[in-house]
Image (cartoon, grey):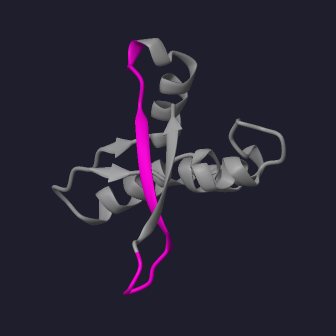
């Protein structure tokens, strides 16, 4: 199974860098589209070169779009990240929790 590059502009890093927005960074996503559209053609080319091979592609863009457009069908995704904000051998470790809900 070959998994295509997903909408990287939708990861928290890029969403947070998009001013006053909680949506995906579509500029980043559009830069990845050529790879996603060329992948099936390249795999077909490989299939002819490697007789007996079988490739299955998971289209991450389409999968993410279905989840984003109809989240009620897929449930809620909650991701928690813990970051160490202060560390000292003699003091208590300070951690910061960031939660992303999709």
Query: Horizontal and vertical percent for residue 84?
Result: 46, 69
* Total numbered labels: 0
* Residue 84 is a magenta residue: yes
The outermost residue toward the left is 52
The outermost residue toward the right is 19
Q: Residue at x 33, y 53 (%)?
A: 2
Q: Quadrant of residue 87?
A: bottom left
Q: Quadrant of residue 45?
A: bottom left
| Left or right of 44, for residue 10 | right
Q: Magenta residues?
A: 73-91
The outermost residue toward the top is 72
Q: Residue at x 41, y 79 (%)?
A: 91
Nearer to me, 100 or 27: 100
* Residue 88 is a magenta residue: yes
Q: Residue at x 61, y 44 (%)?
A: 10
Query: Horizontal and vertical percent for residue 66?
Result: 50, 23
Q: Is residue 73 above or below residue 85?
A: above
Query: Horizontal and vertical percent for residue 78?
Result: 42, 35
| Left or right of 57, for residue 15 | right
Q: Residue at x 62, y 56 (%)?
A: 13
Nearer to me, 20 or 26: 20
Nearer to me, 40 or 68: 68
The outermost residue toward the front is 90
Query: Horizontal and vertical percent for residue 81?
Result: 44, 53
């Amino acid at each position: 199974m070959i998994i295509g590059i997903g909408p990287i502009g939708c990861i928290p890093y890029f969403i947070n860098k998009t001013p006053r927005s909680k949506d995906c960074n579509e500029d980043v996503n559009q830069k990845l589209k050529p790879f996603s559209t060329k992948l099936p053609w390249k795999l077909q080319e490989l299939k002819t070169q490697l007789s007996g091979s079988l490739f299955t592609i998971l289209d991450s863009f389409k999968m993410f779009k279905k989840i984003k457009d109809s989240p009620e069908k897929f449930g809620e995704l909650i991701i928690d990240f813990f970051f160490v904000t202060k560390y000292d051998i003699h003091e208590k470790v300070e951690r910061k929790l960031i939660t992303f809900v999709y």
